Image (spheres, rainbow, N blue to C red):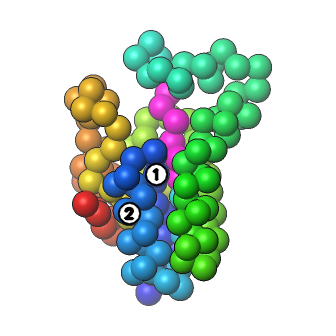
């Protein structure tokens, strides 16, 4: 029985679909939304500001706020609440590491811009290949 589900989310419509799917299919499970902010680098845009911020944890929360608000609205539509967590790092690596604490992962097929997918790689594919638990990929 699936009791704990991890739903990685960014600001994409496919991430929202993944959350809706998880809430529909795993009605009795404890759902956790994870937003991973990319590691600071010259190519990662807003994440670079984390390294320069006076309070890096606060900056990560700020970068995750919109995603968590969207997740909260979707959960409210389903009459439930979801847990939210944010982390810094390589999205695929952080998701796979966190998956160890869950029974399943539900993830959108891809996220970000075409440039992000070409530079960073397909997060969903990497999670699917390396996750220690069952992964459902939603399109």
Q: In this view, does 79 lie above or below 8?
A: below
Q: Residue furthest right?
A: 54
Q: Mark 2 or 1 closer to N-term? A: 1
Secondary structure type for disc 2: helix
Q: Mark 1 points at which residue?
A: 9
| Residue 121, position as x, y percentages in the image | 26, 35
Which numbered disc covers residue 18?
A: 2
Q: Distance between the residues labelled 2 and 1?
A: 8 Å
Q: What stretch is highlighted in magenta?
A: 34-39
Q: Does the image show residue 133?
A: no
Q: Which of 5 and 115 is in front in this view?
A: 115
Provide the secondary structure element on which disc 1 rests.
Answer: loop
What predominant SS class does the magenta segment belong to?
A: strand
- What residue is shown at x 60% (from left), y 52% (from top)? 68
Residue 11 occupies which quadrant of the picture?
A: top left
Picture quarter with the N terminus: bottom left
Number of other residues with Cα within 10 Å of mark 2, as a class: few under 14, some 14 to 19, many 20 or more: many
């Amino acid at each position: 029985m699936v009791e704990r589900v991890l739903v990685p989310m960014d600001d994409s419509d496919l991430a929202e679909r993944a959350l809706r799917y998880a809430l529909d299919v795993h009605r009795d499970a404890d759902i956790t939304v994870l937003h991973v902010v990319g590691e600071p680098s010259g190519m990662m845009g807003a994440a670079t500001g984390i390294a320069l911020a006076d309070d890096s944890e606060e900056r990560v929360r700020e970068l995750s706020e919109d995603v968590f608000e969207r997740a909260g609205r979707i959960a409210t539509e389903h009459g439930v609440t979801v847990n939210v967590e944010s982390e810094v790092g390589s999205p695929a690596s952080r998701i796979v590491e966190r998956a160890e604490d869950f029974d399943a992962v539900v993830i959108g097929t891809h996220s970000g811009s075409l440039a992000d997918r070409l530079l960073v790689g397909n997060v969903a594919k990497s999670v699917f290949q390396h996750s220690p638990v069952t992964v459902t990929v939603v399109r």
